Amino acid sequence: MKLLSAALFAGTAALAFASTAQAEADGEAVYNQACMACHMTGAAGAPIAGDAEAWGPRVEKGIDTLYDHAINGFNAMPAKGGNMSLSDEEVKAAVDYMVSQVQ
Ligand code: HEC
C-alpha cells in the first residue's frame, strides 16, 4: 500500500512536470517531480538520494547499468519511475543528479 500511494503520488507530480517540461533536461527538477517520492523516503527499498552506503555498490555497476535500470525498471524500481511521459534524457539527468549527491 505504501508503494502504491508513493507511485500514485509520483505519477501525479510527474504529470504536473510534463506540462512544464523544458527542452533541456533538468535532473534536479525531474528528481523532485518523479523520483523523490521513493528515493527520499526509501519506499519499497529504494536507495535514498545522498546515502553513500546505499548508492556505492550501485554506482560500481556503472552509470550505463543505472540508466538502463532507471529507464526500463529493476525489481521494485518502476520503469522511468512509473512516468512513461519522461524522455530517456530526462530520466538519465535524474540518475546523474542522484549519483552526484554521493560523489
Ligand atoms: C515507486 C517508487 C520509485 C520511484 C517513483 C522511483 N524509484 Fe528508483 N528505485 C526504486 C526502488 C524500490 C529501487 C531499488 C530496486 C532494487 O535494488 O531492487 C530503485 C532503484 C533505482 C536505481 C538503482 C538501480 C540499480 O541498478 O541499482 C536508480 C538509478 C533509480 N532507482 C533511479 C530512479 C529515477 C531516475 C527515478 C525518477 C525518474 C526513480 N528511480 C523513481 C523505487 C522507485
Image: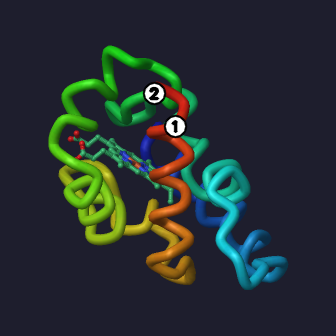
SS of the residue under disc 1? helix
Q: Residue furthest right?
A: 20
Residue 1 shows in this picture: no
Give the residue type that dot 1 points to.
Ser
CA gap, disc 2 to disc 1?
5 Å
- State the image coordinates of residue 25 (x, y, percent, origin top left): 65, 71
Q: Secondary structure at mark 2?
A: loop
Instruction: Give the amino acid type for the residue marked by disc 2 in the picture.
Output: Gln
Please tell me in which quadrant of the rendered image residue 46 appears.
top left
For residue 83, above or below residue 33: below
The residue under label 1 is 100
Q: Nearer the viewer, residue 28 or 85?
A: 28
The image position of residue 61, as x and y in percent, is 15, 43
Q: Position of residue 48 (x, y in %)?
A: 46, 27
Residue under numbered circle 2: 103
The answer to whether any part of residue 60 appears in the image is: yes
Left or right of residue 38: residue 22? right
CB contact under 8 Å: marks 2 and 1 = yes
